[in-house]
Amino acid sequence: MKFSLGQSAPRVEDQRFLKGGGRYTDDINLSGQAYAYMLRSPHAHARIRSIDVAAARAAPGVLAVYTGADVAADGLGDMPCLAAKIAPLKRPDGSPIFVPPRPALVRDKVAFVGDYVAFVVAESHALARDAAERIMVDYEPLPLNVLTAKAVGEDAPAVWEDCPDNICFRMELGDKRAVEEAFQAAKHVTRLELPMPRVAINPMEPRAALGAHDPFEDRYTLYSGNQFPHDIRNWMSEAVLGIPESRLRIVSPDMGGSFGLRANIFPELPLVLWAAKKLTRPVKWTNERSDGILDEQARDMIMAVELALDDSGRFLGLRVRCQANMGAYLANFGPLPAFGNLGGVAGVYLTPAIHGEVLGVFTNTSPTGPYRGAGRPEATSAIEQTIDLAARQLGIDRVELRRRNIIPIDAMPFQTGLTYNYDCGEFEANMDQALAMADADGFEGRRAASRSDGKLRGFGLANAVEQAAGMFDEAGEIRFDRQGHATILMGTHSHGQGHETVFRQLLSEKLGLDFDEMRYVQGDTDLIGYGHGTGGSRVAGLGGGALLGAAEKIIDKGRRIAAHALEAPEVDIEFTEGHFTVAGTDRSLSLREVAAMAFEPAMLPPGMDSGLQGFATFKGPAPTFPNACHISEVEIDPETGVVRILRYLAVDDVGTVMNPMLLKGQLHGGIVQGAGQILGEQILWDENGQVLSGSFMDYTMPRADDVPFFEIETNSVPSPRNPLGIKGAGEAGTVGAVACLTSAILDALAPLGISELEMPATPERIWRAIRDVRGPDT
């Protein structure tokens, strides 16, 4: 069975997943393992006067009860924040970003509901949990704040004494003076405040960790699903455990989703390793869903947007101010979503001058971190909602307003007014194709039909562009055996994307291998020599580029072996469809035959090493920029406020499409996550900092019957920034969906005079907005 790139090869990994063969962290068990339970804080902000663990330690089956004092005594380091190191972040007074210490277990105070207080290890999970209930903690409640809008000011309680103003960092991007001049010259200014709700990160599989320690090698092994196995090993060994990387092995097995969550070093990771060494037996910890919702969340920022236009509707300047909630601590990539993708506010438009200001603030809430899109959906929503509002204020058709300002093809590559430099794209063609698919000209007739049924119908439009495949390089390796079968070893990590399939497709096309002649390995730092991982839509472009480079090395060595065996000049050896052939003849050797020769030293050219393997790394010269046009139609029942998505379509430019079926799967999932954020997902607290939406009884996840069948088409413009021409697709669906569905809902409500609505657009929120404009008796 062979498939090349561009074909919809069925997912190889589904053969085991659908038959119960998936191997997740909690499926792994080691001989003699113990079980751990985490005691968490019930307070959002409190001083710990004392902790009494005597009764817990005396409970049946308990092996140990650890507190912050034990962690400090053994010298475990604090959880790291990579984002604070990769960007020159400073506070308003010029001092460095404030990074609060986050030990594996707190010692003096708790800073959010769910903070890590004690770690109980017992013979079973049930016994550990029962023992945790016997721990007596004397808390002294402290003043608190959980709201982004109230994090800064004279009345805002300080989360940390050493940071009394709650300002973590302040960053400015762009040309402030040019923007000021643009606004002075403007004939119209549109202003919009855009609060983005906090959401929970809810992969299907809860987090889990299993730690083991070999006393003879003094070496640790951590089994835990994560997105960046080699990087997690690096960060944790150095910053937390204080050991060389070589003394820590990380095995990341199958994962049931991640979406940014498992890019973090959570306290349980070093704790299971530390406890395993102290107890001389493996220790397993598995999270519970209600605790998982508390652990790390995302979004939660307030954006103030101003767009300056001239009298013909041309964009002159854009100003964006963002106040982003970091939570109580800084997650590993915590600050990054607030500024790392702010360049997306430029959109697909010619706006010459843009300035952004980001203020990161602390509150008594769980840390925030990357979640599918990681700042991209926020940036796209900011510009697209502002354009819609400007069009209404100016009386210009919103499609026409976009056309007047869209970046033309002949402007590529294009330096935006902020940070992004677009490699290529046909933005107006995407929009035209999507409008034709949607029968945009017939929408007003459909709106009238809905109106006659007592419903409000809206048409949503969003042009999206995002940054992808940035930051680190990536690695790929191919090892052949004597029979000509290949093992693919990747530094990336699949957690639902289909890597096992698309990388087989790449080598099937490049090397002429059948799918069943290839084996795929990922996630084990002992087996894979180098790599980073998965995130930021980087795998296909960077990982694919690396694997392509490894394949080229296989071909180069194979060509030399074939030339030696066929007694022909190396330049005369051609490689096509898995065979090395002397040009112009029928003299040929298959790759299988060459692989067998590679293990026979007598058959190799003088000085050549035995074996057939190739390893390569790849880093693009700059990020790529996937882009799309999303269109949706919604219908609102004004009597109940219920929103129904009637239709959803998108035209995406992801560069070269490796597998159309898998691409659609990625886009479908991303769109649904965007829909969840707009229709109902939100973390809410009471005045004491207690999470009110801490379970699936209260936290509204999207369901299958909330969305229609999606219509996806592509307008692929290959990127010049990697050898495969790939731009990326993992986050594209969410980036467009958040803005597009907001646009549709506001368009449905616009005839009533409602131009702004805080998201999520829950039935109650919509019903109250309609009631406010119509009056209570309507």
Image (tube, rainbow, N blue to C red):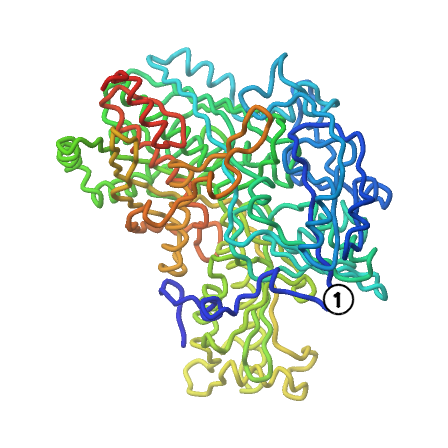
Residue tagged 1: 32
Relative to 686, is 501 above or below? below
Residue at screen point 57% across, 29% down: 325
> Residue 14 appears at what percent x and percent y?
45, 67
Residue type, numbered disc 1: Gly
Task: Please determine whether, in this image, residue 493 is positioned above or below residue 758.
Answer: below
Would residue 733 be visible to someone looking at this image? no
Along the viewing direction, whichever of 356 and 315 lies nearer the viewer: 356
Position of residue 162 measured from the top left corner of the image (x, y, whole percent): 75, 23
All told, the count of numbered labels is 1
Identify the image quadrant of residue 52. Answer: top right
Residues 244 and 496: in front is 496
Q: Is residue 716 above or below residue 603?
A: above
Q: Position of residue 596 (x, y in %)?
A: 58, 85
Rendered position, 688 above or below 462: above
Question: Residue 402 falls in which quadrant of the image?
Answer: top left
Q: Looking at the rendering, in which quadrant would you find the N terminus?
A: bottom left
The local secondary structure at tag 1 comes to: loop
Residue plotted at (86% across, 43% down) = 73
Is the residue marked by circle 1 packed among few (<14), some (14-19), or many (20+) residues within 10 Å? few
* Residue 550 in view here: yes
For the C terminus, which image quadrant?
top left
Give the camera-side residue of 302 and 707: 707
Residue 567 quadrant:
bottom right
Closest to the observer: 764 or 590? 764
Residue at x-position 36% and y-position 27%: 765
Residue beneath the point at 31% across and 17% down: 772
Percent x, y of residue 38: 69, 46
Q: Is residue 530 left or right of residue 536?
A: right
